[in-house]
Amino acid sequence: MTREEIIKPENLVYRRTPVLTDNIMHYCPGCGHGTIHRLIAEVIEEMGIQDKTIGISPVGCSVLAYNYFDVDFVEAAHGRAPACGTAIKRLNPDKYVFTYQGDGDLAAIGTAETIHACNRGENITMIFVNNAIYGMTGGQMAPTTLLGMKTATCPYGRTVEANGYPLKITELIAQLPGTYYVTRQAVFTPAHVRKCKKAIRQAFENQNLKKGVSFVEVVSNCNSNWKMTATKANQWLEENMLPFYPLGDLKTPEK
Amino acid sequence: MAKELKLMKGNEAIAESAIRAGVDGYFGYPITPQSEVLEHLMIENPVEKTGMVVLQAESETASINMVYAGAACGKKVMTSSSSPGISLMQEGLSYIAGAELPAVVVNVVRGGPGLGTIQPSQADYFQTTKGGGHGDYRLITLAPASVQEMYDFVQLAFDLAFKYRNPAIILSDGMIGQVMEKVVIDDYKPRWTDEYIAKTFPWAAVGKPASRNHNIITSLELDSAKQEQININIQKKYKVCEEKEVRYEMINCEDAEYLFVAYGSSARICQKTIELARAEGIKVGLFRPITLWPFPSKQLKEAAKNVKGILSVEMNAGQMIEDVKLATECRVKAEHFGRYGGMIPDPNEILVALKKQIM
Amino acid sequence: MAFQGTLVIDTEKCKGCGVCVETCPNKVIALSKKVNKKGYNYLEMVKEEACIGCANCAVICPDGVIEVYRAKY
């Protein structure tokens, strides 16, 4: 078969979702943010809720997420996305509301907002991208930085004495009765991406049930600040991040 | 229907007015001396009356960011607090001003600095009228001097906030917040429908229909040339506001040889001092700014032409006096008299100050 | 029944990160020695006849630059 014979509308198996804009993302080559954005956008497309969705972007690398989603967006102050999500959902209970935050935003400066939105059981979807480092500001230590991991502000490696322990905030919020679905996913292989998308879809569909927060952590990479190639970073993620941040559901409606 | 008359606290008037003005959401955190706002809202349970959402947030920081996001959806949203809580809200206020969103904040001021005291004060004048948070912005500032004005200014603040897409603040204090007076109250106004909001505020993040581009609410612009242009546009808006929105009141000024300049509680006390002074034959009047920003500079300059001296009476260590001197270009003697840290000046000591400092 | 696949790659939007290359079961794709306008070694098909249209590459691509077609024969 020739290429021309194959490239026909009826043979299309994958194309970029129109819920993403045409803007080229500013993320570094190989960064997981792009993949996670795409999954959310695909879920919005498949559920047919583009006109009913309001997204909230954080401060950090994904601050400009609003440029890439073709949905209405509110850019929150650092760490305040869950407070923003709370107000938007309460004032617009029929809309689908999601927050998108990194580890510094969600688990350091915004810890109070995160925990209280989860504890109040707000009917929102929270996406938490954990790459164990501050990307936008140039690779400083995050609350989720692993012990021994080197960053710009722990250049000799994170130690318990100086910096305390990496924060497993997802385990923490899974304990709260206000969360309905809590899961940890990754996007470093096609199989993980497909699984992650299912989790995000679940987290969005749960908003119809009005039973509380659906929370998806995505363990991701930061090859630039980890100072590795993208493929090496994905390998490093599997070998170092996943033993400490194991993948899987922490809380499902059935359990 | 005839207007209803009710005896209520200043703080309750804020809450009652919010419900009746068709406000969509209130997000707040308890702090003395304004907790009655949230308490009254919870008792009234307006979600059953008008659908208004009331939420006790985990902090003032969360409250103001809830207000930011509610405003981003074109909703009428507000919060209230007192001085230390308002300090925590400065982050959100700067973002609301930067993203050009309408919102209303009430500050029932108490004495500072720090945790200070819970008694009335006007020590947040600088913070309120000069911006407060980071960046070049202003808050439209209304200073009520009665419980009726607490009630009336909620609606006025929303009108101004939506007209200029800028936060408006009601700068009250612990005295006006706690005192009980009779208030004329309105009928319930219905809240805006989602259709009305989508049509009237095309900028609002309400969910993107196929017919328009996506709306983005942000205060971020990484291109500094564009950020400068945003700032220029905001400043143009402020110029219009300064031209059109000045509000003030003049009492006993027709024959006045001396002038008190005072707002809020201080203005109430000065009215008593005027009685005492006039009984002694001292011709003194009161110039009461109602908008503290925009400050009634032109009007005060005009009023100051015929007087021998001005005493700026404030419950702080001397803040509005700077705007008084700027307005009058120091062409007339202007001094400050203040009590602070939660102390309320006595009408007699103001008269003594007038005689000593100005006459 | 077998599948023949092919890709349409938006080479100007490709950042040449290469994470897709490793996911291809048949080593159909590789980074080019040439660069796009941004200076990235963009993705290209080097063994087109081996593509089965599994979409692994498109699913992992952070920038969504790969379109996948698959025909039965």
Image: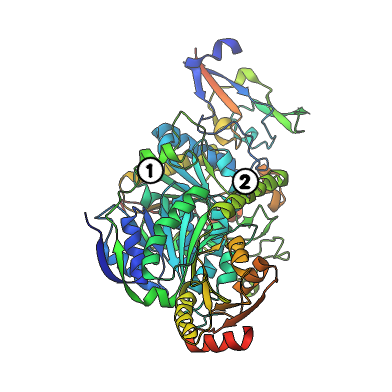
**Mark 2 vs mark 1: same chain?**
yes
Badge 2: residue crowd in 10 Å (few <14, some 14–19, many ≥20): many
Which residue is denoted by mark 2 in the rendering?
A234
Identified at 48% across, 45% down, the residue is A55
Q: Position of residue B18 (x, y in %)?
A: 35, 59
Give the Cα distance between marks 2 and 1.
35 Å
The chain letter under disc 1 is: A
Tag of residue A95 = 1
Q: Position of residue B111 (x, y in %)?
A: 51, 80
What secondary structure is marked by label 1? loop
Q: Which of the two labelled residues, at mark 2 and mark 1, occupies the earlier sequence position?
A: 1
Q: Is residue A118 visible?
A: no
Q: Amino acid at mark 2?
A: Asn
Q: Is residue A153 visible?
A: yes
Question: Is residue B62 rendered to the left or right of residue A24?
Answer: left
The chain letter under disc 2 is: A
State how many labels appear: 2
Question: Is residue B55 rendered to the left or right of residue B220?
Answer: left
Q: Residue furthest left?
A: B1
Badge 1: residue crowd in 10 Å (few <14, some 14–19, many ≥20): many
Colour style of the rendered protein structure: rainbow
Q: Name the foreground residue: B259 vs B41.
A: B259
Q: Name the foreground residue: A69 vs B178.
A: B178
Identified at 28% across, 54% down, the residue is B188
Q: Amino acid at mark 1?
A: Lys
Q: Are marks 2 and 1 in contact (CB under 8 Å)?
A: no
